[in-house]
Image: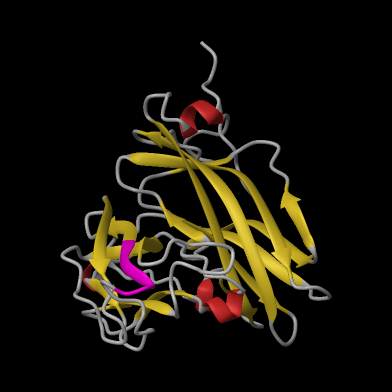
Amino acid sequence: MAWPTLLSAARRNACGLATINKFGRNTAVGTTYAPLAAGGIYRTPQVAGATRLRVKAGGNAADTAGGTGARSILLQGLNAAGEYVSEVVATNGAAASASTDTYFLRLFRFRVYESGTYATATAGSYAGVITIEGVDTVADWASLPSPAVVGFPLSQSLIGVYAVPKGWHAYVTAASYSIESAKLVDLALFIREDILDTSPPYKPMRAQKVFGGAESSGDIFLSAPLGPYRELTDIGFMGKVSQSTADVSIEFDLLLVEGPAPTNDYQLQPVGGTING
């Protein structure tokens, strides 16, 4: 039997398969490794640090239920059990929104869900910076940049990291990057397994691909998909620049497969699977 195409997986015509596209951008990558996400933020707490989320106070007055900007926000991630969850919260202008009912362990995507403006090339769907914060941790979890910074209201978070939900495993099938002109950046694809562990020994944060001195833009050629990556694994890109700061974007595709991952451990299975490094 032929393996289903990625198009079949994307259209959900292949049972037990799904495709995920992740893209992130950090406009100020510094001289130490940071996630390729807006503001360099990607929270990875342990289970005890799972928190309700809300839209942080200090936003634009137009981004409110009944306003001309973003009226509600959709948040997607994992709960404290590692299960995929999503929830919609209404915006509240310059004041904080109500908190989610869900306790989030990971937030890998959020976007404008409803807007008061029929968007055009000159009129966007939100008005100002939208920051998501943890209610119980009082820390920023993600940010949607101001339209003035990115040139147009994107209405979609820029988080170049994903967390594999419970009951699935994943493969990275493609990746590409774009770097600010005349800057050299070290890029690294990292994983961290078993994110629900609550006591040592912990699985390490481990590099899967490292690209030193990357510049301009390009595709990260993969002769074979990377993986398999088990359920409850963080997968994402970080970067650093040799001096000053750099604007760096990343995009990568994943294939999710329902069920447990086959092992590719050196000791347990020396043949089969893609072994990295």
Camera-side residue of 253 and 110: 110
Q: Position of residue 48 (x, y in %)?
A: 21, 70
Q: Residue furthest top?
A: 1
Most frequent secondary structure within the magenta stretch: strand
Q: Position of residue 116 (x, y in %)?
A: 36, 67
Camera-side residue of 46 and 174: 174
Q: Please tell me in which quadrant of the rendered image residue 107 appears.
A: bottom left
Query: How many labels sit on residues?
Result: 0
Q: Is residue 246 above or below residue 73?
A: below
Q: Is residue 87 left or right of residue 122?
A: left
Q: Position of residue 25 (x, y in %)?
A: 59, 68
Q: Is residue 217 left or right of residue 98?
A: right
Which residue is rendered at x = 51% and y = 10% of the image? Answer: 1
Which residue is rendered at x = 34% and y = 33% of the image? Answer: 259
Q: Please tell me in which quadrant of the rendered image residue 14 appears.
A: top left
Q: How is the image coloured?
A: secondary structure
In the image, residue 68 lies in the stretch drawn in magenta: yes
Which residue is rendered at x = 50% and y = 33% of the image? Answer: 269
In the image, residue 16 lies in the stretch drawn in magenta: no
Camera-side residue of 139 and 63: 63
Q: Please tell me in which quadrant of the rendered image residue 189 appears.
A: bottom right
Q: Residue furthest left?
A: 101
Q: Does residue 202 show up?
A: no
Q: Residue furthest right?
A: 182
The span picked out in magenta is: 67-74
Q: Is residue 261 left or right of residue 238?
A: left
Q: Is residue 160 left or right of residue 277?
A: left
Camera-side residue of 235 and 130: 130
Q: Does residue 46 show up?
A: yes
Q: Position of residue 222 (x, y in %)?
A: 69, 42
